[in-house]
Image: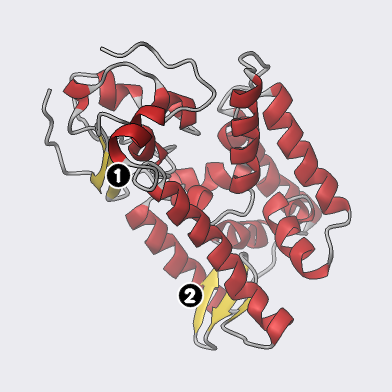
Amino acid sequence: MEAMNTSARPGQAAVRRKGWFAAHQWLILRRCSQFGILALFLTGPMFGIWIVKGNLSSSLTLGTLPLTDPYLLAQSLAAGIVPASTAFIGAAIVTLFYLLVGGRVFCAWVCPINPITDLAAWGRRWLGLKSGRTPDARTRYWLLAGTLVAAASTGTLAWEWLNPVSLAHRGLLFGMGAGLWLLATIFLYDLLVASRGWCGHLCPMGAFYGLLGRTALLRVATPRRAACNDCMDCFSVCPEPQVIRPALKGSASPVILSPNCTTCGRCIDVCGQQVFRLTHRFDQRSSS
């Protein structure tokens, strides 16, 4: 059995056994997805090629397909703002998609804040920072409720003035301005104060999409959990490490069923024992 990994570079055993690309393939795919989606929005205003018009909150793809953030729609309705019928259609499409694949897939594969918080997590490992003041994970649900209350009490989309996802997207088009300071604050908070503090404990958008993921079909599982050598690499890189233990060390389902799992695939990447795989929620195969 290998010793527990205390290195700032988890996944080295996976690199040795699987090769560098296989030990980073899900990370590479996520970055391609995140930056590719941003590129679709930017090709119009930057090059006049309008594949997608709008932003991550509301868009029209190829002049036909409306997509609307259901969280934005909820805020609009709470504020007493009734949007056009296409917004309801777009929200229904997005909601159905995330009900099937998992709401927090948005956090890992779409959200432009994820590379910033991933960089902060890497920095914590590199600096060897272990401690911090991490807020209760339920805080994000209280903040989610607070954004809807703020919308209802002000009659405006109050949260969207502070939403780092919206600010990042606007900043790429019109210049960061004050948004840069908010993104820097999130980075420094995650780096110096609380590990995965923003995405894992505070972000109301992540909380909303987590609620959509409770019945999702797409899941990460641990079919070879008997091969686990307790190196802890998966826990080191996982943005929501508490979701791993029931499937990895429990006696019941080998499938990670928590709605907080972002399906980022990093546990699959860094595991040299190839314990993890991407599958569906009904796949109960296990070697344990």
Proximity of marks 1 and 2: CB atoms separated by less than 8 Å: no
Question: On residue 80, which mark appears?
Answer: none
Q: Is residue 44 above or below residue 210?
A: below
Color theme of the render: secondary structure
The part of the image, by quadrant, that contains residue 155 is: bottom right
Residue placed most toward the observer, 262 or 234: 234
Q: Position of residue 52 (x, y in %)?
A: 58, 79
Q: Is residue 56 above or below residue 60?
A: above
Q: Going 59% across and 24% down the picture, which residue do you hit?
A: 125
83 vs 109, left or right, is: right
SS category of the residue bearing label 1: strand
Residue 175: x and y, percent? 84, 64
Q: Does residue 64 sit above or below 101 in this rendering?
A: below
For the C terminus, which image quadrant? top left
Asked which secondary structure carries label 2, the reply is helix
Q: Would residue 183 be visible to someone looking at this image?
A: yes
Relative placement, left or right, of 190 versus 279 is right
Q: Residue at x 62, y 54 (%)?
A: 112
The answer to whether any part of residue 242 appears in the image is no
Residue 198: quarter of image:
top right
Query: Along the line of sight, which residue is nearer the eye, 18 or 95?
Result: 18
Q: Which residue is mark 2?
A: 89
Kind of residue sitting beneath label 1:
Arg
Q: Is residue 130 left or right of residue 96?
A: right
Find residue 200 and report its horizontal and vertical position in percent: 56, 33
Q: From mark 1 to mark 2, how far is it between C-alphas? A: 27 Å
Q: Nearer the viewer, residue 86 or 63?
A: 63
Q: What quarter of the picture does the N terminus occupy?
A: top left
Q: Which label number is shown at residue 219?
A: 1
Residue shown at 75%/57% (left/top)? 167
Q: Nearer the viewer, mark 1 or mark 2?
A: 1
